[in-house]
Amino acid sequence: MRAGDKAAVSALRATLGALDNAEAVPAQETELRGSALEQSPLGVGVTEAARRELSEHRVVEIVKAEAAERLEAAAQFTAPAHAHRTARLRAEAAVLLRFLDDSSPA
């Protein structure tokens, strides 16, 4: 795998994780009466968690935030010893920003 591919895979995996987290619905606090086993749901699909549907605008915001986070982190590394890490963070940000450019309406 080429170095550019590794940066792309890393950036996309992390961004997919951020999108997945944004879709998560917070668990509601419920008061359990009796034993937890008695309150347990049964059947197919009971382990499926509710998910939010993100708007295209929200997805773009999250991808931009992920790119900005990488650029900010790269700016923090000023020592020559961190040049490889800085280059990787910038490459990851470039992948995300290129993805946004490619997905914008023409």
Image (tube, rainbow, N blue to C red):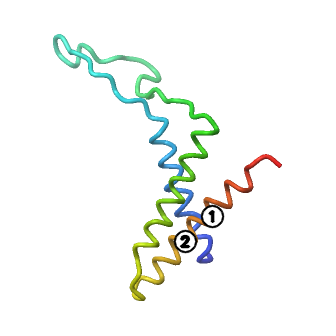
Label 2 sits on what residue type? Answer: Arg
User: Which residue is disc 1 drawn over?
Assistant: 95
- Residue 6 vs 24, above or below: the answer is below
**Residue, x 40% and y 77% (percent of image)?**
77
Element under disc 1:
helix
Q: Observer-nearest residue: 91 or 43?
A: 91
**Residue, x 72% and y 56% (percent of image)?**
101
Q: Observer-nearest residue: 47 or 63?
A: 63
Residue 51 image point, x, y percent = 49, 30
Residue 43 image point, x, y percent = 42, 18
Q: In this view, does 45 lie to the left or right of 38?
A: right
**Mark 1 / mark 2, whichever is N-terminal:** 2
Neighbours of disc 2 within 10 Å: few (<14), some (14-19), many (20+)? many
Label 1 sits on what residue type? Answer: Val
Residue 23 image point, x, y percent = 49, 36
Circles 1 and 2, Cβ within 8 Å, touching? The answer is: no
Element under disc 2:
helix
**Residue, x 51% and y 55% (percent of image)?**
66
Name the outermost residue toward the top.
33
